[in-house]
Image (cartoon, rainbow, N blue to C red):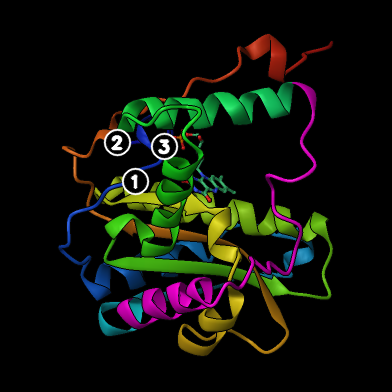
């Protein structure tokens, strides 16, 4: 597989088989991804990965917080906030694609909320990752985290592993810090569930579209 194929075949997966990814494969992916570029080579990324019992304890701890009535308390403003115009429209289209694929009425707020909770059961994935950087850094540094995360996801594609990047996994940082652990003073930007895709899962039939070249680029000479 070449890079082009990896980029073109990666897609967000929201339904996984229970089979775990061997630890040596996870290690190899991170070992390679740490060569990603960053501003002034600061390498602000840190990735905490939970599997097995730790994954299950974390899921239970997050759901316990939600049951207590705790509202999400992400340490950075979530990416879905502050959207307007065409960006708001794309967010809506994205959600509707997903609701349609899983057979949920677009107006059924209860079913939508229930569907959203699947984020915190990692869509059934055997592994969840949390990408963090020092909370003293600025949003420009988040570019480095994004580059790192995409590098991880493409290396996963190359190995037949699917992933779901999830801003939602930044919503309950308390249990993540306690169970997954991360450097003192770090704050989570994004999480990611990963494992082997369950192709029978209706949610995995979603194919998101992209804006054409002329909307996203301008070449001048
Ligand atoms: C930073 C980031 C955060 C995301 N957060 C979520 C999330 O919380 N829950 C979710 O189901 N999908 C999430 N996604 C997946 C996007 O919805 C998905 O990437 C987008 O619709 C494009 O689809 P594709 O990845 O299949 O090409 C996120 C993606 C990114 C890059």
The residue pinned by badge 2 equals: 204
Measure the C-alpha gap from mark 2 to mark 1.
6 Å
Q: Is residue 211 left or right of residue 28?
A: right
Spot occupied by residue 220 in the image (x, y as percentages of width and height): 83, 12
- Residue 68, placed above or below residue 33: below
Spot occupied by residue 30 in the image (x, y as percentages of width and height): 43, 67
Residue at (39, 67) in percent of width and height: 128
- Residue 103, placed above or below residue 147: above
**Residues drawn in magenta:** 56-85
Residue at (17, 55) in percent of width and height: 17
Spot occupied by residue 108 in the image (x, y as percentages of width and height): 46, 34
The residue pinned by badge 3 equals: 3
Say which quadrant the C terminus sits in.
top right
Which of pointers 3 and 1 indicates the residue nearer the eye? 1
Mark 1 sits near ligand 1, with its Cβ under 8 Å away: yes
Q: Earlier in the sequence, mark 2 or mark 3?
A: 3
Spot occupied by residue 12 in the image (x, y as percentages of width and height): 40, 41
The numbered mark at residue 100 is none
SS under mark 1: loop
- Between residue 150 and residue 114, name the one nearer to us: 114
């Amino acid at each position: 597989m070449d890079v082009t194929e990896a980029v073109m075949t990666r897609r967000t997966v929201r339904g996984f088989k229970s089979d775990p990814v061997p630890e040596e494969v996870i290690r190899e992916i991170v070992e390679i991804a740490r060569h990603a570029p960053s501003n002034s080579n600061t390498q602000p990324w840190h990735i905490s990965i939970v599997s097995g019992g730790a994954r299950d304890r974390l899921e239970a701890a997050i759901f316990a917080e939600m049951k207590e009535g705790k509202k999400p308390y992400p340490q950075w403003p979530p990416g879905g906030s502050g959207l307007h115009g065409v960006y708001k429209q794309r967010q809506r289209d994205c959600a509707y694609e997903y609701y349609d694929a899983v057979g949920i009425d677009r107006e059924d707020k209860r079913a939508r909320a229930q569907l959203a909770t699947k984020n915190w059961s990692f869509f059934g994935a055997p592994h969840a990752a949390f990408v963090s950087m020092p909370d003293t850094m600025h949003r420009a540094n988040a570019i480095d985290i994004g580059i790192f995360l995409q590098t991880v996801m493409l290396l996963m594609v190359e190995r037949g592993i699917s992933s779901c990047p999830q801003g939602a996994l930044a919503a309950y940082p308390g249990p993540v810090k306690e169970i997954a652990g991360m450097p003192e003073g770090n704050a989570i930007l994004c999480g990611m569930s990963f494992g082997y895709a369950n192709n029978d899962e209706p949610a995995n039939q979603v194919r998101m579209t992209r804006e054409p070249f002329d909307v996203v680029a301008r070449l001048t000479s």
